Amino acid sequence: MKKSTIATLLVFFILIPVTLYLGLKLPGRGYYLTCTLIILEMLLPFFWVFEGRRPQARELVVIAVMCAIAIVSRVAIPIPHFKPTFAIIMLAGIAFGPEAGFMIGAITAFGSNFFAGQGAFTPWQMMAYGAGGLLAGFLAQKGWLSKKPVWLAVFGFFASVFWVGLLLDVCSVFLMPIGYTWEAVAAVFVSGFPANLMQGLCSVIVMLLFSRPLLEKLDRIKLKYNMMGADDGI
């Protein structure tokens, strides 16, 4: 496993959860500090991908464009809980690797919340959205995820419902204003399931219709400009 991928997993499973836990103790709008720390933390493994060489401007521009597309897809679609955002983040992770997918997902949550509304939930959403790109990129990197639209649709559905969606529900649990009880926690997950299901169905549609042309274009750009270590399999 690549050092950058190991670093990404350590950041996701250790560093960011610790940051989120400590961020809960910050008063007022302390969540902005938490968001900033998470962005800095996820940049470390992303830039490690380049392994000593400076990232080219065109590489960062493509990442920025993918972030912008994902943000617009969340803001512009008026249907609640039916956004192409998760699918776009996962496709970015498949094309550019788990480090880039993780960063694109987290920045998408942070950036789109300037339109949807920032709050204490924002750092948790950053982790959950980033998790979608991280998982997709990791599975594709290992060769465990087929790029055929049908299989990507299946993956997109389960990842949206039982991975990103569950992490967002966990966010709701930690931010509950009442004491933790089994009944209250169960109510959060039960009430969140229909929204997760809607999001999963949207991911299925996006994967079936757009995964092939989008991945073909991203792979062409990656190979043409030798982006994200295209020559060494990153």
Image (tube, grey):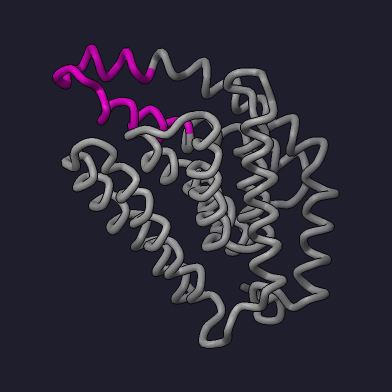
Observer-nearest residue: 176 or 115?
A: 115
Observer-nearest residue: 182 or 121?
A: 121
Q: Is residue 178 magenta?
A: yes
Q: In the image as oriented, which residue stretches furthest toward the front?
A: 28
Q: Quadrant of residue 122?
A: top left
Q: In the image as oriented, which residue stretches furthest toward the bottom?
A: 52
Observer-nearest residue: 191 or 172?
A: 172
Answer above or below: position of 74 versus 220.
Answer: above
Instruction: Quarter of the image for the C terminus: give it.
Output: bottom right
Answer above or below: position of 66 versus 40.
Answer: above
Q: Looking at the picture, how far across and down is residue 169, in whole percent? A: 38, 27
Q: Looking at the picture, how far across and down is residue 126, in whole percent? A: 44, 44
Q: Is residue 74 left or right of residue 130?
A: right
Q: Is residue 163 left or right of residue 120?
A: right
> Magenta: predominant secondary structure element?
helix
Give the tally of numbered discs. 0
Q: Looking at the picture, how far across and down is residue 68, in whole percent? A: 66, 48
Q: Residue at x 58, y 22 (%)?
A: 81
Q: Residue at x 59, y 26 (%)?
A: 199
Q: Residue at x 67, y 20 (%)?
A: 78
Observer-nearest residue: 23 or 206?
A: 23
Q: Looking at the picture, how far across and down is residue 124, in whole percent? A: 37, 40
Q: Is residue 33 left or right of residue 44?
A: left
Q: Which residues are magenta?
A: 165-189
Q: Residue at x 65, y 81 (%)?
A: 232
